[in-house]
Amino acid sequence: MKDGSLGAYNIGDLREIARRRLPKGVFEFIDRGTEDEVSLRHNRAVFERIKFRPRTLVDVSARSQQITLLGQQQKMPIAVAPTGSAGLTWHEGEIALARAAAAAGIPFTLATGSMTAMEKVADQAGGRLWFQLYMWPDRSLSHKLVERAKAAGFEGLVITVDSPVPPSREYNLHNGFTIPFSLTRRNVTDILLHPRWLFGVLARYLLTTGMPRYENYPTEMKNKITTLPMGRSMPLNDTLTWDDLRELRKLWPHKLMAKGILTAQDAKLAADCGADAVIVSNHGGRVVDGTQAPIEVLPEIVDAVGKRIAVIVDSGFRRGSDIVKALALGANAVFIGRATLYGTAVGGEVGATRAIELLREEIDRVLALLGCRDVADLNGDYLMLPQSMQTHAAIGRRA
């Protein structure tokens, strides 16, 4: 499109274009949840139950989305969440997404399971870089990743705490999209029906670096996606405890965040262990099914730790209005995952930039229509909450 819109005027449009361009197995891997997808649907449903209470006759001619997050100013109240599949939606999609984030002045979080090495992302993208860490049973392997991230100049470490075992995503099996990836009659047909992805993504890998690999795994474990990536020493870790977070605090000299917090009790424990922030998250509905929505528990977590550490929230965010609601509930910022991933699938850096632009435009418009000049002024007075969220009155307190 000559107007730079890519034919997308909201995140839903980007999602639909991505659905058409990606093989079904790849698209559903990034788009769907777990089991019966109760959490996935509930994440969105709660946003619809939170209503705005606009103010009128307010001069909103000068509006600002600028925030200070973890000691640094940024232009928008969002950060890009870790999405290990970015490199499967676009050739070296992690670099494309990181560049878009850098241009927007927001942090980008690289996932442990990404297809591009952290050193390459740091060298070719720049910007504010965070690294997401899974702790493996062999802690020394995970600690090596921490040292690599430190050496590469990453300024934030995000440890995922909500995935002790792999979740159940039956649709991956139906689609023949499994890790390790193997070619079957079903997924080969799917791939052939999507030549743009076949030649623009998979073939580019095969002609340059070969079959995509988990480039951030230790050298001895850096297998292709067609082979088991972890071996016995590298599955998800069902022995993870708060002591691991304390140990990471000793190893990591920069900002440390715990991702996957859904209770005030765990938020307090994370703060006690030295975390600089918690990320209130149910993994976008991709781990245990049937949880509360993160936006639903956000007020009690802000009430518990919002004066001590930063509180970031994710899961289910599709509109600028969703982001404004989270800020009014006391979040310091919002993690965006699928929205920018859809954009990356549509057009690489250009598509990711379009996704960020759409959210920026929507936030700005909602602020004006609410009669609010600055995201820093957002608080619970701008919202009408469902009964289940009215217990905690301390809305809008930020560290």
Image (cartoon, rainbow, N blue to C red):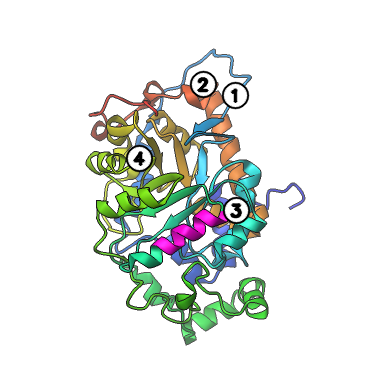
Residue labelled with disc 1: 63
Describe the element under mark 1 as helix, strand or loop.
loop
Q: Give the range drawn in magenta.
A: 143-152
Residue name at image x 31 percent, y 33 percent: 305
Q: Position of residue 196 (x, y in %)?
A: 65, 71
Magenta region, main secondary structure: helix
Q: Residues within 10 Å of mark 1 (few under 14, many from 20)?
A: some
Q: Residues within 10 Å of mark 3 (few under 14, many from 20)?
A: many
Residue labelled with disc 3: 98
In this view of the protein, can residue 8 be seen by the observer? no
- In the shown orientation, is residue 123 left or right of residue 230? right
Lower sequence index among marks 1 and 3: 1
Residue labelled with disc 2: 372
Q: Depth-wise, is mark 3 or mark 4 nearer the camera?
A: 3
Q: Are marks 1 and 4 in contact (CB under 8 Å)?
A: no
Lower sequence index among marks 2 and 4: 4
Q: What residue type is labelled 1?
A: Arg
Q: Which amino acid does label 3 sit on?
A: Ala
Residue name at image x 51 percent, y 21 percent: 372
- Quadrant location, the C terminus: top left
Given residues 321 and 247, the one toward you in this image is 247
